[in-house]
Image: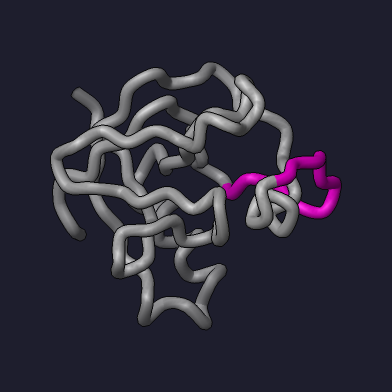
Amino acid sequence: MKTYYKVVKKDLTSCFITGVSQVQYKFNEYVKSPKWLPIGHQVLFVFYNLDSAYSFMCRLSGALNVLDIYECEVQGILECLPYFLNTDALAIGSFCCSTMGSFPIGTVAVKKVKLIKKI
């Protein structure tokens, strides 16, 4: 099985999304995205390789001391990424498209993520 990589806060929550859309990740247990999201956006994001995960983490350089990278297993890999949503709207339980953001290189959308080992 291929290993993917997930960047999370030290408390194992989403590193980029806050509020009601934030996901609590777990060791050795699969988790899913919030069910209230539109069907095409009920996904979680991981990185295809470790270099992409590190690159993303460095983009958030002010948060380096509160982030970790984990090896993870995934289920339900999507063939393409969904359109980018406004993260501020997601934090309050709403959703709308955003033309101001894009996914980092190496991002993969999946249905489920299980954290395996801290890097």
- Figure check: 51 above or below 60: above
Quadrant for the C terminus, please. Answer: bottom left
Residue 73 quadrant: top left
- Figure check: 63 above or below 112: below
Is 81 on the left-hand or right-hand side of 110? right
| Nearest to the observer: residue 91 or residue 64 | 91
Residue stretch rendered in magenta on the structure: 94-104
Q: Residue furthest right?
A: 99
In x, y percent, where is residue 15?
Answer: 46, 61
**What main secondary structure does the magenta stretch of the protein show?**
loop
Is 60 on the left-hand or right-hand side of 73? right
Is 20 on the left-hand or right-hand side of 111? right
| Nearest to the observer: residue 63 or residue 12 | 12
Q: How many marks?
A: 0
In x, y percent, where is residue 109?
Answer: 50, 31
Give me the residue at 75% from left, 50% from top: 86
In x, y percent, where is residue 40?
Answer: 63, 22
Residue 69 quadrant: bottom left
Give me the residue at 48% from left, 70% from top: 58
Give me the residue at 23% from left, 45% from top: 115
Residue 101 lies within the magenta run: yes
In x, y percent, where is residue 66?
Answer: 37, 76
